[in-house]
Image: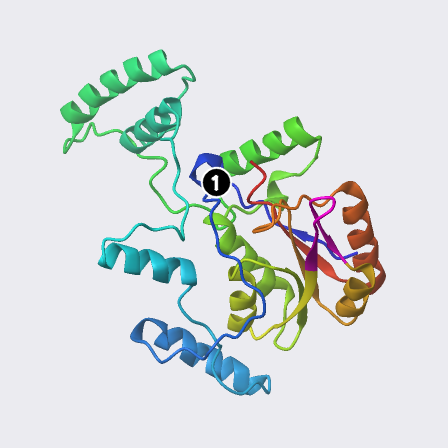
Amino acid sequence: MRFAALITKLLTPFTNSTSQNLHLSPKLSTLSKRHSLSAMSQSNDAHNESNGVVGPPKVQESVIRKMTRLASQYNAVNLSQGFPNESPPLKVRLALAHAVLSGRTSEFDEENYLIESMMDLLRDVLKSEGSSEALTDELNQYSPPMGRPDARKAVSDYYHRLYGYDVEEDQITLTLGATEAVATALRSVGRPGDKVVIFEPFHELYPSQCQIFHLDPVFVTLKPNYDYGTWNYDEEELKNSIIGARALILNTPHNPTGKIFQHGDLKKIVDICIENDVYIITDEIYEW
């Protein structure tokens, strides 16, 4: 079985937005040429011609970003995007500030020690700034493409502690949110013309990114069962849709229905993907 799983949450789940849009059938129009996308379009055009694909990628501004921009422009209440209700924990903010000022990771874990260390650090920074005694900066440099080793180890330890997963740091890539993670997975496993199976309703991100990479999204409908208050898919529809597919995107807990795919659902999906040699790209951004 080919399996692609990306860890899309760093160490700040409190920043995740949980209000996103419901979409059914995709009708994405071709985006007018814009200066910000001209370089990408030229690169894609050259790639498309060499692969027999005609025309630029069909992409457009996301509905969430558009509504947020318009809400700001017209001073309206923005119901399209979720916002964190709470600030990050004080300890996290102190550790971040300490790292930025010192250029080193902090040896302290308790808030009181961090505050005391910060006060000492500020005095040292102000005293040494501009002199040959300036503190050595070990953190504010280029990071490895996969992410800092200590951050990847923290993610590995987290999944071992919570789920018993044994994932080596070298098998983990840190990304800037789920959007980059899904794009990276699709671009890594997909080739122009490949079929990608998506459960609908879906977040607009999935078909939009498929269009960017010239992949063909195919949809399996989640239908409500009003008697039991559940959302279910038709197994035969899934089997038929997945024939010849390159990948399946599995979002659980599911946006926007809230469906949590149970063990039985997951086993059926995995078995079908194994049988058809299909990648599974998991999006678990709503785990918390």
211 w.r.t. 280: above or below: below
Which residue is under mark 1? 148
The span shown in magenta is: 222-233
- Nearest to the observer: residue 260 or residue 149: 260
SS assignment at label 1: loop
Q: Position of residue 213 (x, y in %)?
A: 55, 71
83 w.r.t. 272: above or below: above
Residue drawn where x is 35% and y is 12% of the image:
113
Identity, as a three-letter code, of the amino acid under mark 1: Arg
Q: Is residue 217 left or right of residue 36?
A: right
Q: How is the image coloured?
A: rainbow
Please check the rendered image and state whether residue 221 is part of the magenta-colored stretch, yes or no.
no
Where is residue 187, by image quadrant? bottom right
Q: Position of residue 108 (x, y in %)?
A: 40, 17
Residue drawn where x is 63% and y is 68% of the image:
190
- Nearest to the observer: residue 243 or residue 138: 243
Local crowd size for mark 1, using a 10 Å CA cut-off: few (<14), some (14–19), many (≥20): some
- Nearest to the observer: residue 132 or residue 119: 119
Q: Is residue 261 left or right of residue 52?
A: right
Residue drawn where x is 61% and y is 49% of the image:
254
Q: Position of residue 94 (x, y in %)?
A: 33, 24
The image quadrant where one finds the C terminus is: top right
Residue lying farthest to the front in this orientation: 227
110 w.r.t. 205: above or below: above
